[in-house]
Amino acid sequence: MVTSRELAIARSVIYAALFDYPLTLEQLHYSLIESDQTPSEILAVYDGSEILQHIVEHRDGFFFPAGREDLIAERRRREARSALFLTRHRRALRLVCALPFTRLVALSGSVAHRNLEPNGDLDLFIVTRGRRVWMVTVLLLVLTKLLGRRRSICANFIVADSHLALEQQDLFTANQVIHLEPLVGGDVVDEFVAANPFVARYYPNSRTRAPRPASVPVRSRARAFAKEFLELVLGLPSPIIETACRCAYAWHLRRRAGSWRSPEQVLLKSDYLKLHTQSHRRSILGRFEIAVNRALEHAERVAAPRAAAGGRR
């Protein structure tokens, strides 16, 4: 019988492997699903569990599903690819962070994990100052178009600081939240997490994770001054601009709704803009449960004869 602690370790490693990502002990600790084990406790549970060792391997500092040692080399390739990708987009990210009324700009998705696949893009999560999500989105679209980065940089989740509570509260969403990497507005992350207590229920150790410094330096006095100046100039007419942007861009989005593979993951609200038009959420969660069940069944089949043989001795 698998204990709750063994199951937490197995589930966490298997979930990360769905993205071809082996975990270090530190990463396994803060992304441990529904368990608050310390790193030393994780190691003790693993070392003392034969059935867990049939599910998860621990080698070269990484935890991964048994038989998937290829993930170590793949992780290193993707980390190198991610570093080059971020370096290439550094100037664009600096300008995005200087857009008016952005309180938080954070890397999200695969690039936040440094797990970028070939032809991957750069996902951003943005929190705006007040109800200006549509204006900020349109400004971002214009900026990336001018920079020739429209296909590379995608802000697919923009919320106002008045609407920080997420409407979809599941494992997939919680995992995205704990891996956000703020470029500017790191203090807003605390507000965001406080508004979404479901994240701590899935990942109780995520509260102990030290914030990772942004790998893309974006702060400068000149950009900060330009941002403050634009907010001052646009502050008064911003409600009119916001309404115009919402009408125009919402019309454009609805024209393209027929091409969305996950229309249920699109929300177009005045203070909450979620554009996961090609979401993998449903398939990931489905594959996750299947993978966990298969791993447990296989480990129990392998361990049972050995336990019986040991008992006969």
Image (cartoon, rainbow, N blue to C red):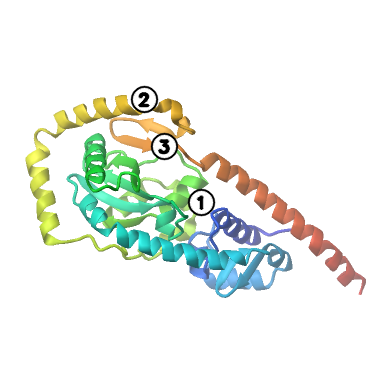
The image shows residue 173, relative to residue 7, as above or below, that is above
Judge from the rendering whether residue 7 lies leftward or rightward of residue 37; answer left or right.
right
Which residue is disc 3 drawn over? 167
Check the picture and name the quadrant holding the C terminus.
Answer: bottom right
Nearer to me, 161 or 302: 302
Q: Which residue is mark 1?
A: 202
- Amino acid beneath label 2: Arg
The answer to whether the residues at label 3 and label 1 have Cβ atoms under 8 Å apart is no
Near-viewer residue (49 or 143): 143
Per the model, the C-alpha gap separating discs 2 and 1 is 34 Å
Measuring 72% from the left and 55% from the top, which residue is drawn there? 296
The numbered mark, 3 or 2, whose residue comes first in the sequence reads 3
Q: Quadrant of residue 143?
A: top left
Between marks 2 and 1 in the image, the one whose residue lies nearer the viewer: 2
Q: Residue at x 62, y 73 (%)?
A: 44
Q: Quadrant of residue 234?
A: top left
Q: Which residue bears the numbered disc 2?
A: 254
